[in-house]
Image (cartoon, coloured by chain):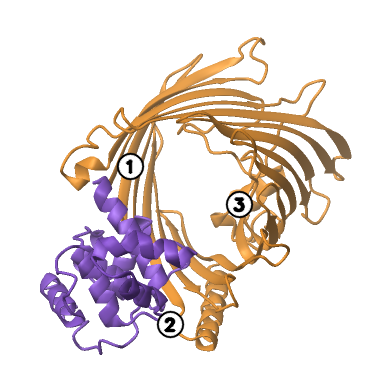
Chain colours: A purple, B orange
Amino acid sequence: MWLTLITLAVAPLFGQSAAQVDAILAADPLSLGDAAYLAVMSSGRIPPEASAEQAIALLEMLAVRAEHRDRFSDRELDSEATLGEFSYMLMLAHDISGGFWYRRIPGPRYGLREMRYRRLVQGQSWALQPLDGERAMRIIGRVMALREGQ
Amino acid sequence: MMKISVRLLFTALLTAAMLLVAFGAHALDAGGRLRAQGDFEQDQDPRGQFTLNAWAKLFPELEGDATAELLIEGTILYVVDDFAAADLEYFTARATLPGRLGDQSVLGLRGGRYQLTDSGGLVVDHRADGVSLSLDYPRIGLRLAGGYTGLLLKQNASIRMSAEDLTDLLDEQTTTASPRLIALFELSFPEVVLRQNVLLGGVAQFDRQSGDEDLIDTQYAYLGLNGRLFPGFYYDTVALAGGVQYTDDALDIDTSGIMLAASQRFLIFMDALASSVISMRALYASADDDEFKAFMPITQPDLVTLSPIVASDLLFGSLEYSLRPFGGADSHVLQNIGLTGYGAAVFDADPTGDDAYRGTEAGGRISLRPFSDIGGSIQVGAFVPDEGDTTVYGRIEFSTSF
């Protein structure tokens, strides 16, 4: 029931078929490629038919000022994404401004801190926490609500 | 004292390291906080203090929706020209277990060094070593908690109930805080009707000082009501009756009596008007007279004033207005500037008595939060007494978490 509701809510957002969104929702753990795709796609920076490689490339371009610019490219796309990485991706893709320490040391650690402060990430959380598709979708839902409120 | 504290801290960190190995490094979060505070009082030397906290949280994996957490937090406290101390701030194991005692139940367990707080806000808000259990259902919540304060570091504690507590504070041989055994019981009834919540609670405090010095035991029973009256208009009412027993074998004193306290607070949120918040509070604390004993909380309740006001033989009323005048600005820094103005009138518990009016404090505060992890404030207040000269107070605070 819960999965169905999320699917119905977010499918139009990505221009995706319900089956594709279902596959991401069911992913546990979420892969790095899917996490990058979700983060960048939800920001509207790439079209729905874009690939995970394109999403990663865009994230690296957006992180050009950051010290961790190679953080994603040195990882396999099918490796497990962490909550910290996904938070950092969302902050880059949605241009969410970070705190003092995030600006000096941009990356998953302070990305997650900022997302927690803004209540975009809720519940028990740490940077290296594994992430599943359902939680990722909930976080994206809150990010979209924040953007609409601005 | 510093050596003992450092040993405690080291033991905690060693325990954390062992648990880290046991649970795996991935289920870990860690960070720190730095806080600086300067207090100023007219005709007195300024007082500055720095607090550096380092914390680590471990997250053991549990079955289903259950969650657990182990928090270890150490503090280094430095008061300029006075002392430096290292303390184990928290060492708390916590578990939340949904559905263990019924489908809609949430069982919460806490143990170790944790913050022991009564929900009424009049009795205690202090760290203690002990355990706490909560059991929540949609219509009723139960909380049982107990703790001991005699193992805390005295410089990093704020329980001052008896003359002996003050003597110990000045005694260099004494390193630990006032030894009090505290037991708490609460029943809460959330949203009984029309978003109104009811709280019933009781706290018993036993003075565990050894020897024949003065001992003060206290018990408190309270009834609280809180909730929303209109959209954006909230209230919080607490009425308390308690018992107090003084004994001093050396002076052959053995007396007891009843004490009373009550608090009424209104909060009005007006988002459309520069995120304005109006806060009104009235506080009553009984005096030592023919009928009652002076109210004596375990820790003093938070008041808006800078002048030291003790919740005993007191009738207190305050009005506070806060706003964010630049909430619509493009600059994130300007958006998060907060301005507060307040006034507080202080009377004896019986306002009809001679010289019952003690004075009024008026002041203001500017708070800044340019980033989510850096903030600060400047507060200035002037206490105008019924008789005598006005005293000006000030406080500057800065904090960052990393």
User: Does residue B380 appear left or right of residue B68 in this picture?
Assistant: left
In the rendered image, residue A77, in percent from the top left (x then y), is placed at 25, 86
- Residue B377 is tagged as 1
Name the chain under label 2.
B
Identity, as a three-letter code, of the amino acid under mark 3: His
Do the residues under discs 2 and 1 have CB atoms within 8 angstroms?
no
Badge 3 is on which residue?
Answer: B126
In the rendered image, residue A28, in percent from the top left (x then y), is placed at 42, 80
- Secondary-structure class at tag 3: strand
Quadrant including the C terminus of chain B: bottom left
Q: Is residue A105 visible?
A: no
Q: Is residue A142 visible?
A: yes
Q: Looking at the picture, does residue B261 appear above or below residue B386?
A: below
- Residue B26 is tagged as 2
In the rendered image, residue B98, in percent from the top left (x then y), is placed at 63, 65
CA–CA distance between discs 3 and 1? 24 Å
Quadrant including the N terminus of chain B: bottom right
Foreground label between 2 and 3: 2
User: Does residue B164 appear left or right of residue B232 in this picture?
Assistant: right
Q: Looking at the picture, does residue B180 appear above or below residue B225?
A: below
Residue shown at the point (82%, 20%) measured from the top left:
B290
In the rendered image, residue B309, in percent from the top left (x then y), is placed at 55, 31
Name the chain under label 1.
B
Residue shown at the point (30%, 68%) measured from the top left:
A87
Crowding near the residue tagged with mark 3, few <14, some 14–19, many ≥20 C-alpha atoms within 10 Å: some
